[in-house]
Amino acid sequence: MPYRTEFGSHYHVTEGCHGATIPCGTAGLSPCSDCCGETGGARRSAAPTDSESGAGNPHVTPSDHGGRNRFSEGSRQSPGYGRQGRSARATGNRQVPNDAGCVYVGYFIEPTQFEALLDRLDEQGLGDGHLHRMISCPHVTIEYMPRDAHGELFGATQVMTVVGYGNDGRNEGVMVELGAVGDGKLDRLGESVPLPHVTLSVSRDGKPVDTGGLEFVPLDEPFELEGRFGGFTTDKRVVFEDPLAMPPDTALTPEMMAVMRRQNEGASHPVSVQEVVAPMRNPAIPPDGLVTDVNALADRVASSAGMVVVTRGAAGCGKSTLISMLGDDATVVCPDDIRVHLFGIEQDDNGKWGIPQRDGGRVWGMARRQVAEACASPGAPVVIDAMHSRPRDIKQWQDIARQTGREVVVVDMTDVPREVARERNAGRPEWKQVPESVVDRFYDLAEQNTQDIRRRFACVDRIGFAKLVSRLANDRNKA
């Protein structure tokens, strides 16, 4: 997840290069343009230059790792740093010398692997001192500012061994030994790194670039860790073989699948389609502004490239059950499904199962890419199954729909009273329940902005949606 730190009037956010927020002007770093491509404005002149600090690069090359004095040679840079020319990519006041636009390449640790790493350290009594900022994009740097990003190798899996742990109060990390990948080029690149390591966390004044200088203590029980070869690009995303694809290996273990099956069977108040479509009344949110001429809306959908259905309602109001009326042809994108795929389901301190809500930027980014891909092919409906509390939550899908010639239809289920939603949420399978405060937060927002949403988007209630689906199905059958 991105971290944000206030530094004067400037907010510096990064999701990969440092993995944690480093304020502009931090000693040893140039301004934000050096870190995330953003400009620090008037503060720029106050930051140390390469010649002043000897550490203008936020990452050092493999030959610069592995010693506390690795910055002693002043402004030494990677061989490709000063390369100019048509293939160079700009990032702040530097030039990325490869066509892929990768600031650095390395082995990136996916969230489930990172969690497993922290758990193994805890088991050995080494994880109690995590520092102020956990790294959001943990990785082993292989090359900084590479001339060749080796994009054809993105996605290759590296099985490394965690052999050491270090924490000096400013930086926390682990030392790893890289295994053989089986590709000659990657194996040679790995052998060129004197001290492969992964930064775990930093203090308020710590810098991830210093992690290689830790005095790593050998682990009593070394363990394996997987990473995937990829690159950090100038648009701040980790790319693998296909940046639009979800990871190929699901985070769900057989044990988690068994838990989910038991929880589904154990739902105390399952909601049927009949109950979902039955009319309800929420005195706090009147029906004003809903589309009443469903036939006109159906005509617009029929003349477009297809329908983008955006559900709007609290947890437990029956969104997923209602969209099942669209049948198997619809593409359904659900952020919670992506979370389960990435992270599995987890138990909290009280032993209650739930869907992890971390790394929202990554989850919603994947959801947007999946929706855009599905919308690119005209025809079958595309559905986004989420609460959609605010106008901006819906606008992102309208922007995608307009680019692909589709019509947005918001299924507004705020007629379900707050108390009913609370009761239904409590009756859901345990792992699908959300805290009651989340339900209340949705209704607090809905009572403020529902009329605005209905003015800006075509919104139908549950009855209107059922009529729309029926009308479109009849038209298809006649054709």
Image: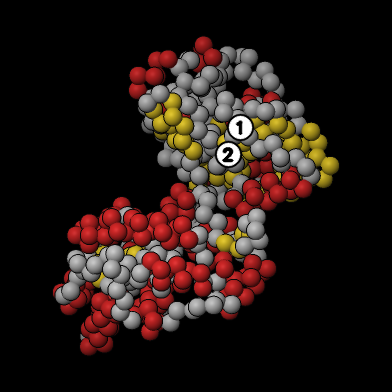
| Residue ID at (53%, 42%) | 231
Viewer-proximal residue among 333 and 431: 431
Q: Is residue 156 visible?
A: no
Where residue 4 appears, as percent x and y from the top left, is 46, 35
Q: Is residue 338 left or right of 352 when viewed as pictured?
A: left
Q: Is residue 237 visible?
A: yes
| Residue ID at (59%, 77%) | 266
Q: Amino acid at mark 1?
A: Val
Q: Which residue is mark 1?
A: 202
Compare marks 1 and 2 and give the one earlier in the sequence.
2
| Residue ID at (64%, 48%) | 114
Viewer-proximal residue among 180 and 284: 284
Please say if 84 is above or below 391: above
Where residue 424 appears, as percent x and y from the top left, is 46, 72
Q: Which residue is most to the top?
A: 52
The disc at residue 135 is 2
**Disc count in the image?**
2
Kindly check if marks 1 and 2 are in contact, taking CB atoms under 8 A apart as contact: yes
Please say if 25 is above or below 369: above
Q: Amino acid at mark 2?
A: Ile
Q: Tell me the quarter of the image containing the C terminus.
A: bottom left
Q: Quadrant of residue 334?
A: bottom left
